[in-house]
Image (cartoon, rainbow, N blue to C red):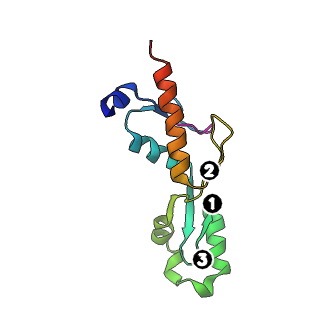
Amino acid sequence: RLHQIHDLQPYHCTYEDCTDPNRLYGVRREWVDHENQHRRVWHCYVHEEEFETQPDYMRHLHEKRLEHRPEDSSTEMVAAVVGASSKPHRDCPFCPTAFPDVATMQKHIRYHLERLALYALP
């Protein structure tokens, strides 16, 4: 099954604003890594919050400066807290399904992509 999925390359980006929407992925991990780039946020681990832009995160650090260390504002530390959101920010792009978490969202969308690739076979 793994070889069939790899040969089919069923995975592609499902975000409308993608700059490389026609790229195909035969490996699920590569697809997930790509999709995670669209869900990039800045994490405040002190307050367990996520910020969609760096200026929002920097504003948070400034407003809560008494609760953060001075080095938290350094270029290196700001770059270190960037990562994929832990929350699903959208419903399924193929059907009207909402998700409780990111893992469920990725598994559900993966199912659609694999099924579509299989339907496309002659």
> Which amino acid type is shown beneath numbered disc 1?
Thr
Disc nearer the start of the sequence (3/2): 3
Q: Residue furthest top?
A: 122
Front residue (pair 36, 91):
91
Instruction: Tell me the element at label 2.
Output: loop
Q: Position of residue 42 (x, y in %)?
A: 56, 64
Residue 5, quarter of picture: top left
Bounds of the magenta segment: 13-17
Disc 3 and disc 2 in contact, CB within 8 angstroms: no
Going by the numbered disc 2, the residue's amino acid type is: Phe
Estimate the spatial distance between the alpha carbons at disc 1 and disc 3, rounded to whole Å. 16 Å
Give the image quarter of residue 97: top right
Instruction: Tell me the number on the disc at residue 99.
Output: 2
Residue pictured at 62% horizontal, 64% vertical: 51
Looking at the image, which residue is at 66% across and 66% down? Answer: 56
Label 1 Cα crowd, 10 Å radius (few <14 / some 14-19 / many 20+): few
Q: Amino acid at mark 3?
A: His
Give the residue number, with chain letter if any, for mark 1: 53
The reply to whether discs 1 and 3 touch (Cβ–Cβ < 8 Å) is no
Please state the horizontal and vertical placement of residue 113, each as a whole percent of the image: 51, 32
Disc marking residue 26: none
The answer to which of 95 and 30 lies nearer the viewer is 95
- The numbered dot on residue 47 is 3
